[in-house]
Image (tube, rainbow, N blue to C red):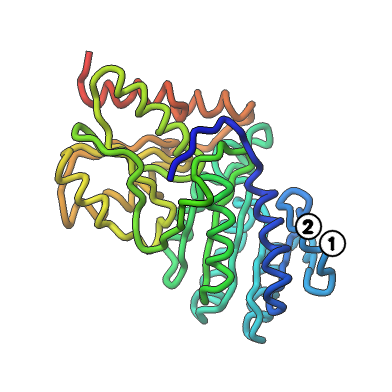
């Protein structure tokens, strides 16, 4: 399932290319953007299918309402902008119009997490998963590489109902073999098997976790690594089985430790398998401007920092 590749690709490009492919097969698909189509790469769809693309301007709330209207008319709608603007700015419209009516609107937000970089705190969505998890009827998905982006967008196009899909700004390593990996919306994905500790992640931090797990193995710590692209609905069977074995769980995410993947893990384990859980993510804080790798280092999300934090968590000298 995993491939050993250092090649990096743009998940935003993959999103745009997948929309074009789907547009040829399904003439019911329409795409909306809030004046950021070059950044989100929905511009690819706009060039090929201009009659099914609508630039709503810098008016994100209007974009979501327009998406809802098109969905009421029977369309499958993909609406995109930066994660900060797609969620916090549009909560009323997403909750009361899209989700309450169970409309077929896919909010595919790019530029999620601290790795938005130099744009700074105003553009770094560190709470978006928490917002979307809290809304009834909303599915929340965070892909980890371009193979997964492609498969998740295809899944979204044929699955009715509201969906929030978060895509990072940064290029990502290819992790999954497109010939062998199959996105499963009802299960976590076990990527490594170990007996000492469980590490859960998704999105762009998954590659960091896999590298950290190699470093841990070098000092004799065997890790279960579980990828959870679907944060909601959270299917906890793989997590529970692993936690019962290892007794200790670490969650790593490019998001606040409040309300995201770590919270979903804690909520499930508190019911089915009370365990010691350590959450690695941004704390109760805003982000800041900086080069994306430096920010990952500062907030403890690089493989080296994850390794150091897990060693400390396990009290290994």
Residue in view at x 54 percent, y 42 percent: 113
Q: CA distance from mark 2 to mark 1?
A: 5 Å
Residue in view at x 36 percent, y 42 percent: 191
* Residue 243 disc label: none
On screen, residue 294 versus residue 260, left or right, reads right
> In which quarter of the view is residue 174 placed?
top right
**Element class at badge 1:** helix
> In which quarter of the view is residue 153 placed?
bottom right
Against 115, residue 160 (above or below) is: below
Against 280, residue 37 (above or below) is: below
As drawn, the residue found furthest toward the front would be 179
* Residue 47 disc label: 1
Q: Nearer the viewer, residue 293 or 87?
A: 293
Q: Indicate the position of residue 167 as horizontal and vertical percent values.
A: 58, 49
Residue 62 visible in this rendered orientation of the protein? no
Q: Indicate the position of residue 218 as horizontal and vertical percent values.
A: 31, 18
**Element class at badge 2:** helix
Mark 2 in CB contact with mark 1 (< 8 angstroms):
yes
Q: Nearer the viewer, residue 171 or 218?
A: 218
**Number of residues whose C-alpha sits closer than 10 Å to that of mark 2, classed few (under 14), some (14–19) or many (20 or more):** some
Q: Indicate the position of residue 110 as horizontal and vertical percent values.
A: 63, 50
| Image quadrant where one finds the N terminus | top left
Q: Which residue is mark 2?
A: 44
């Amino acid at each position: 399932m995993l491939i050993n590749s250092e090649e990096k690709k743009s998940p935003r490009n993959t999103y745009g290319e997948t929309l074009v492919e789907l547009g040829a097969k399904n003439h019911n698909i329409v795409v909306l953007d809030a004046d950021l189509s070059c950044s989100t790469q929905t511009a690819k769809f706009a060039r090929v299918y201009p009659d099914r693309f609508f630039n709503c301007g810098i008016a994100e709330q209007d974009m979501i309402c327009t998406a809802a209207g098109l969905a009421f008319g029977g369309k499958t709608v993909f609406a995109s902008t930066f994660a900060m603007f797609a969620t916090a700015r549009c909560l009323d419209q997403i909750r009361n119009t899209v989700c309450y009516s169970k409309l077929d609107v896919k909010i595919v937000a790019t530029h999620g997490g601290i790795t938005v970089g130099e744009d700074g705190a105003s553009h770094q969505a560190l709470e978006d998963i928490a917002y979307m998890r809290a809304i009834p009827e909303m599915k929340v998905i965070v892909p980890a590489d371009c193979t997964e982006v492609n498969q998740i967008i295809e899944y979204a196009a044929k699955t009715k109902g509201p969906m929030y899909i978060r895509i990072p700004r940064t290029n990502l390593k290819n992790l999954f073999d497109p010939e062998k990996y199959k996105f499963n919306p009802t299960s976590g994905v076990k990527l490594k098997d170990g007996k000492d500790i469980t590490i859960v992640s998704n999105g762009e931090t998954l590659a960091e976790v896999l590298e950290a797990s190699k470093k841990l193995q070098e000092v004799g710590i065997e890790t279960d690594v579980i990828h959870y692209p679907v944060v909601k609905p959270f299917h906890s069977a793989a997590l529970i089985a692993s936690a019962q074995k290892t007794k200790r769980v670490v969650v790593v995410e490019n998001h606040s430790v409040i309300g995201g993947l770590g919270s979903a893990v804690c909520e499930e384990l508190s019911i089915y398998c009370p365990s010691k859980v350590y959450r690695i993510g941004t704390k109760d804080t805003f982000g800041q401007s900086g080069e994306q790798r430096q920010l990952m280092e500062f907030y403890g999300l690089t493989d080296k920092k994850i390794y150091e934090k897990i060693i400390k968590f396990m009290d290994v000298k």
